[in-house]
Image: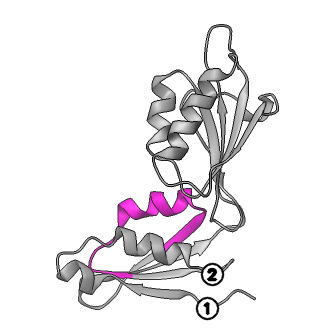
Amino acid sequence: MNPAPRDLDVRPLLRSGGEPFQAIMEAVSGLAPGQALRLFAPFRPQPLFKVMESRGFGHAAKEIEGGDWEVLFTPQETAPVEVSADAQDPEAWPDPSEHLDLTELDPPEPMVRILAAVERLQPGQVLFALLSREPVFLFPELASRGHQWAGNFDESRTTFRIFVRSGGKGVTS
């Protein structure tokens, strides 16, 4: 049996001119496995749906009194795997030749270490890394350097797992 949803009302924070994203992400980080988050907001938080989906949460939104919204973010069985636009068939990639556990490092150090490590790989080789958060600034940097990636959060939604395939000549699907 899953624990009761955690309630988070960001309406007072928004009324005072604050930005609720950090509070929402802290609430998500504090959820027990299988626990949902019930969010109250003065508007339908459409951009948040994609962020939460990438963390493995589905959503059900309904308008409540006064035009406010209640959104229930429910953890899904497994977080969907995100892939770079040019990544073809990540399941067919070779096993990683390098493994990094970067969960204890603060940004931007994980990004710096991943970029340095992937540049040492031969084209087509794969690096695997564990991170304490989704590396949103790493994704465009990898793409600009011709590398592919695939990743998602683990079942506890506390660790982001990423595979990076080194780009270069002769790399095909």
Estimate the x, y position of residue 84 in percent, counting from the top left: 56, 34
Q: Which residues are magenta?
A: 40-60
Does residue 158 appear in this view?
Answer: yes
- Residue count near mark 2 (Cα–Cα under 10 Å), binned few <14, some 14–19, many ≥20: some
Query: For residue 35, which numbered disc appears in the image?
Result: 2
Q: Residue at x 55, y 45 (%)?
A: 110
Question: In the rendered image, which quarter is residue 132 located in?
Answer: bottom right
Which residue appears farthest toward the top when viewing the image?
Answer: 169
* Horizontal relation, residue 127 to residue 36: left or right: right
Neighbour class for label 1 at 10 Å: few (<14), some, many (≥20)? Answer: few
Nearer to the camera, 58 or 79: 79
- Amino acid under disc 2: Gln
Q: Is residue 34 magenta?
A: no
Q: Earlier in the sequence, mark 1 or mark 2?
A: 1
Q: Amino acid at mark 1?
A: Ala
What is the x, y in percent for residue 22? 38, 69
Give coordinates of residue 104: x percent, y percent. Answer: 60, 58
Residue shown at 51%/30% (left/top)? 142
The C terminus: image quadrant = top right
* Rendered-image quadrant of the N terminus: bottom right
Establish if 165 lies above or below 31: above
3D distance between C-alphas at marks 1 and 2: 7 Å
Q: Are marks 1 and 2 in contact (CB under 8 Å)?
A: yes
Residue wearing tag 1:
4
Label 1 sits on a secondary structure element that is: loop
Q: Position of residue 96 (x, y in %)?
A: 78, 33
Please give the label number shown on residue 168: none
Q: How is the image coloured?
A: one colour
Kindly indicate the quadrant of the structure image that contains residue 41: bottom left
- In this rendering, would 73 be left or right of 88? left
